[in-house]
Image (tube, grey):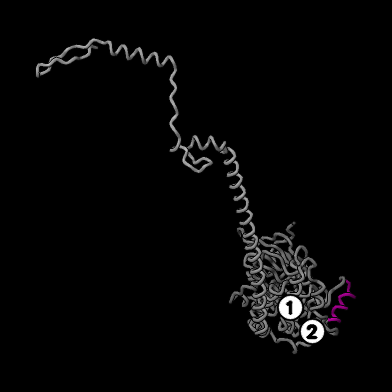
Amino acid sequence: MAKIFTITEGLENMGALRTGGQGSVYKGKRMGAIITAVKLLPTPIHKENTDDKNFRDFQSEVEKLKKVNERPSPNVVKILSSGLTESGSLPFIEMEYIEGPDLEDLLKAPHNPVFSIREALKLAEQLAAALAHCHEVGVRHGDIKSNNVKFNTATGNYILLDFGLAIMSDEQRRSSLRNAGAVEFMAPEQYDGKMLFETDVYSYGVVLYELLAGNVPFPLVNKHESARNLVMVAHIEKPVPDLLELRRTHLPADWPEDKKMAEMQVPGWLLEVIGRCLEKLPEKRYKDGPELYEAVCNGMLSKEEVSGQFMALQNENAVLRNKIKDHERLAKSRLLIIAALLLGVFIGAFAIGSSFNRKDPGDTAGKSGMPGPGGKDTLNNAKPAAVVQRPETKLADSSAQKKKSATPKKKKKTKDGLVDDVPYF
């Protein structure tokens, strides 16, 4: 994207991220590889001195904004710097760049059209903490909406962004909201140019309503002036539609019935908090962020919430126990099948071996010395078989005997004078 202007020395313009009625957000790059987000306001300030009212108002709001970071919050974007652009003299604030989707993105496909109760409670606590942090130092945001809250993929926290309206003068703010503000999230008093702490509380209620119901209470059908006026009148006069009915119609069709039933059990205290935030009159709402945050924390620690979480844990445990039992049954059946297969192999091998060793019973008894059919030991009782000699063997033995007897003997004198016959060899 073309760089149409220089922001300030040491801060490179890398192109627009988003544009709107309250100004444009650009991607900036500090010296090195540091990526930031830069909010540019649409009204230039030509004189950078205290004689210019617009410059004084800008400086006053920036000083308030600096207090937000004096005590850092994990749910509020860090403000890095502010000033006027070198070309165009446009006021800007430089913020840390948050990597991740905003709430508007998280309600679009492929994500579910509604938040789960658990995730909605997480956001309710963290966004209320962000508002409490800002209001404690006197900063009113003025533009809380679903695309001004991001999910930080690095930390897993929800982060409140874009303090553009916070540094505008009342006149600039009034003109901006009337012509290009996000009317779906605007409190009734904003149409008169007012921006109160209760205004942020109202917008907070619209954001929570949208996440649970899948839609804002009074949606904008198109961007025509007549459609915007209808939404403004609805915020002022019409009652808020039933949140649970809208949630029922927006639950994902592929969710199982037990999950749908569980996700319809929105805590009563949370519905009461949202209802009070969306009151038409500011004095009927929570007066500021700290009071709202206290109400959310008390609700999350209430008996209803604790018992609800306990029931949810019990249900999860029951599901896990059933899965464990199913796995055990499956494992047992597999073991039985393996045992049966091994037994079959063993029996088959034994049968094959027996068939090879099977002989005639008589032969086996005679040769092996095993008891015969009569049950007696045939080896011990058997008579010795007669030895049959061949004629040639008889003749050889006879001649050898004759030769032996015919051999002359040598007479040998012994000590006692006797002569003994000694055969000659």
Marks 2 and 1 sit apart, C-alpha to C-alpha, by 33 Å
Q: Residue 357 carries which label?
A: none
Q: In this view, does 104 lie above or below 305?
A: above
Q: Which residue lies furthest to the left in this view?
A: 416
Magenta range is 223-234
**In the picture, which quadrant includes the C terminus?**
top left
Task: Give amino acid for label 2.
Answer: Glu
Circle 2 is placed at which residue position?
A: 189
Local secondary structure at mark 2: helix
Q: Does the magenta stretch include residue 231?
A: yes
Q: Which residue is drawn at 58% across and 76% down?
A: 71
Q: Is residue 43 visible?
A: no
The first of marks 2 and 1 along the sequence is: 2
Please tell me in which quadrant of the rendered image residue 76 appears: bottom right
In front: 141, or 61? Answer: 141
Q: Magenta segment, principal secondary structure?
A: helix
In front: 230, or 324? Answer: 324
Q: In this view, does 234 lie above or below 347?
A: below
Please tell me in which quadrant of the rendered image residue 140 appears: bottom right
Categorize mark 2 by other alpha carbons within 10 Å: few (<14), some (14-19), many (20+): some
Circle 1 is placed at which residue position?
A: 265
Q: In this view, does 163 lie above or below 368?
A: below
